[in-house]
Amino acid sequence: MSKELPIKNIFLTGGSGKVGGALLPELVKAGYKVRALRFDNEEINCPGVQEIIDGDLRDKTLAHRMLKDMDAVIHLANCKENRDLFLESNVAGTFYLLDEAWQCGHIQQFIQAGSDARAGIYYYPRPFPIDENFPHAGYPGYYSLSKVLEETLCEQIRIQRGLAITVLRFSWVMGQDDILAHATLKGPRFGVPIWKEIAETPEQKKFVAEGLDAACRMDHLDGMPGMRHVVGLPDVVSAILLAVGNKAAIGKAFPIAAPAPFAYDVLSEYISKKLDIPVLRFKVPEFNDFRHDISFSRSVLGYNPVYDIFKIVDDAIAFRKAGKKRIDPKYIG
Ligand SMILES: NC(=O)c1ccc[n+]([C@@H]2O[C@H](COP(=O)([O-])OP(=O)(O)OC[C@H]3O[C@@H](n4cnc5c(N)ncnc54)[C@H](O)[C@@H]3O)[C@@H](O)[C@H]2O)c1
């Protein structure tokens, strides 16, 4: 089952979240025995999961109980932009898990969910592309700070204790109809910019006032389209499955992004054609283009993402056509 490390029993945090909810059935399908942590009475509906246990990352005694008989940890749980909670839930919570994973002596691999937020992405001008060696330099905010601190804990526990840790740094994850919620004017809002709030031209204001829909194109001040690198949820799941039990992944951090970045002219034209709505252009001064170099993940993990921006849009349209109910993600992107 596992590629090289003898991993059978996995403790999973965040199993009811966006990534965890998609990952859990695939872990079960792959034959792993999963103990899933449930928090806040959130639903975990996955036939075949070995155990579902209620618990809070802030509980210092949790890790000792949860890691008993486990071979690996996949740590996805965290809270998002929350000043009051992030230190206890994300930072202390990650520390308790890492410390116990080292102390108990039987954890073969600890997989930590990282984020490209740790590199500050569009907030600052960055090398083009950003690779795995780019130093941590988060954008302003508690979430980004938390992802830097979680990774720093992982790095130090790996150095100090020799714990076998793999970090997977996801880009902004696109599932459900997220890309449409992001890149169209009407309907649910997802991510930044918030088009309605930055509407300033008479045309933009008319669209907003009349409740019209449009495919939103983000431009720089010189009219060039913005560029951004996201990732499809199924590719994130495939990256985690490739990492589990993979000896070559130990002690490394991997950028996990789509096969290529997208430019907003291409995205907005595609959505416009598919949904038969016009394109509306917005000038956004504070956005810096970014792209991730995933060649390290391709060569070491065998990561081979297939969700380009067109497939992500097609899936989002299919999601809406099927009448599925959108669950608002906690991380707005
Ligand atoms: N969604 C993205 O775009 C994205 C991008 C990059 C990285 N990531 C990372 O991937 C991981 C999973 O993200 P997601 O989008 O699935 O998150 P999510 O918010 O959908 O799910 C997070 C889960 O953490 C649980 N949780 C929160 N506080 C807890 C606590 N105190 N104790 C126990 N459980 C708690 C929640 O119940 C939830 O199930 C996170 O570490 C996140 O930082 C996500």
Image (tube, rainbow, N blue to C red):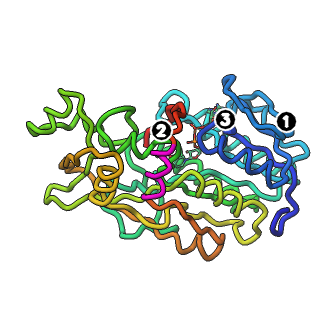
Between discs 1 and 3, the one toward the N terminus: 3
For image coordinates 87% across by 54% down, the residue present is: 8
Q: Residues within 10 Å of mark 1 (few under 14, many from 20)?
A: few
Q: Which residues are magenta?
A: 310-318
Residue of label 1: 51
Between discs 2 and 3, the one toward the N terminus: 3
Between discs 1 and 2, the one toward the N terminus: 1
Residue of label 3: 16
Taking depth in this image into account, of 283 and 47 the one nearest to the observer is 47
Q: Quadrant of residue 67?
A: top right
Is residue 66 located in the magenta-colored stretch of the structure?
Answer: no
- In the rendered image, the residue lying farthest to the left is 202
Is the residue marked 1 within 8 Å of ligand 1, measured from its CB?
no
Q: Disc 2 versus disc 3: distance between alpha carbons? A: 22 Å
Is residue 311 located in the magenta-colored stretch of the structure?
Answer: yes
Residue of label 2: 320
Q: Quadrant of ligand 1?
A: top right
Q: Is residue 180 left or right of residue 103?
A: left
Provide the secondary structure element on which disc 2 rests.
helix
Q: Is residue 177 above or below residue 240?
A: above
For image coordinates 39% across by 56% down, the residue present is: 121
Q: Are the residues flagged by discs 1 and 3 in contact, CB closer than 8 Å? A: no
Taking depth in this image into account, of 117 and 230 the one nearest to the observer is 230
* Labels 1, 2: front one: 2
